[in-house]
Image: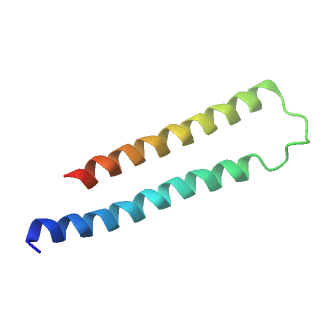
Amino acid sequence: MNADQIIRLIMRQVIGRLVGRGVDAGINAMARRSGNRDAPVDEAEARRRAKSAKTAMRQSKSAMRMARKIGRF
């Protein structure tokens, strides 16, 4: 095993853990925000919730793309 292969293995482990935490944190935040679904919600609150859900989804997709790119080097 040469140095490049060792570095690649280590980087995959590190990036996988970092990305996993980021995605999990986004999912947990979305779950906390959507706790009381039966309560009446005004339009501004509904828009804010939808925007934060879209942002979390976009960030998680972006993190996964970056992890795949780094994993290929």
**Residue 67 percent across, percent down from the top left:** 34, 51
Q: Quadrant of residue 3?
A: bottom left
Q: Nearer the viewer, residue 19 or 42?
A: 19
Q: Residue furthest front?
A: 1
Query: Image check: 18 left or right of 54?
Result: left
Residue at the bottom extreme of this rendering = 1
Residue located at (27% from left, 55% from top) = 71
The answer to whether 25 is drawn above or below residue 37 in the figure is: below
Place of residue 32 in the rendered image (x, y in percent of width and height, measured from the top left):
72, 53
Outermost residue on the top side: it is: 43
At horizontal 83% and vertical 28% (from top left) the residue drawn is 42
Q: Percent from the top left, x then y, of residue 40?
A: 90, 35
Q: Nearer the viewer, residue 47 or 62?
A: 62
Please state the horizontal and vertical placement of residue 28, each as a whole percent of the image. Answer: 64, 56
Q: Quadrant of the N terminus?
A: bottom left
| The furthest residue to the left | 2
Residue 26 or 44: which is nearer the viewer? 26
* Residue 25 location, quadrant: bottom right
Q: How is the image coloured?
A: rainbow
Q: What residue is drawn where x is 30% and y is 63%? A: 12
